[in-house]
Image (cartoon, rainbow, N blue to C red):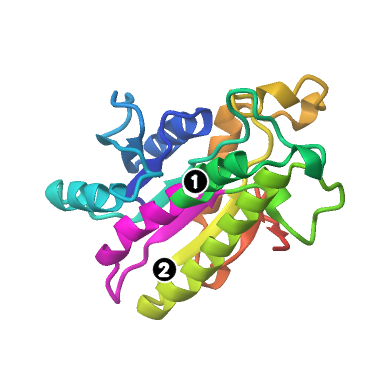
Amino acid sequence: MTGTVLVAGSHGTIGRALIKSLSDKGYRVVTVSRKAEKLAESDNHLAVELTEESSVALVGQWLKDNLIELDGVICCCGQLHQDGNLPEKNLKQLNQAWLAKSMSVNVVTHMHLAQSVAPFIKSKSRLRWLSVSAKVGSIEDNQLGGWYSYRMSKSALNMLVKNLSIEWQRKASGTSVIAVHPGTTPSALSEPFTKNWPKDKLYPDDVTANRITTIFESLTPDGSGKLYHHDGTEIPW
């Protein structure tokens, strides 16, 4: 089944690879990111800052003006480090400003995008939504501690996905909403942490994108409201 898929965070490593993967599968891909330039396989692009509340109306109007009827959404927005702020090793390193920034980029972007899309969901909709999340957001799976702000923000994203899956299925029983842990892909996000990472657990961007596309295509309402590993297995919340 093909159709139109919106990829948000389209200029990131995984976002760019997803555009190609989805296009190769025959999907029409439209994109949203902070950057203005349209990527090659993108049919239509909107430059907008999804951390800002004004983005809700802007994305909604863009979809309406361009008569974009979405079959799916994949939101890749996320941030692990920036400007010397790295994942915390202990409580002392955790600070309010960076936690707020992590929440803004890792959660609020997905929230605003969902608010933009929600008015277009009708009772017969079969919209598929996939948020790129992280295994470290799983509370039950956490055995190592540390990485406070990133773990907290990804846990919050996972709760957003769970809530969204319930609300949208009440409105349209055919919808599917999930979160996916993509594995470690060489990128600007992961670069500081991959030097000693096992080579067999470093996945090229095209492999990661194809895995996400496969999960996206296999989405059903029965599988909604869950966090999945890139191999399709379920990760506990």
Circle number at residue 104 = 1
Which residue is at a point 86% across and 47% down the rendered structure image? 144
Q: Is residue 216 magenta?
A: no
Residue 29 figure quarter: top left
Identify whether 65 is placed above or below 14.
below
Q: Position of residue 113 (x, y in %)?
A: 37, 52
Q: Which element type, helix, strand or loop, lies under badge 2? A: loop
Q: Which mark is residue 175?
A: 2
Q: In x, y percent, where is residue 39?
A: 33, 25
The quarter holding residue 1 reads bottom left
Q: Residue furthest left?
A: 65
Nearest to viewer (mark 1 / mark 2) = 1
Mark 1–mark 2 Cα distance, whole angstroms, equals 26 Å
Q: Position of residue 211 (x, y in %)?
A: 58, 42
Residue 102 percent location from the top left of the image: 57, 42
Q: Amino acid at mark 1?
A: Ser
- Tell me where the magenta segment starts and ends, as one range: 109-132
Q: Pointer 2: residues within 10 angstroms few (<14), some, or many (20+)? A: many
Residue lying at 36% horizontally and 75% vertically, measured from the top left: 172
- What residue is at 41 percent from the left and 80 percent from the top? 170
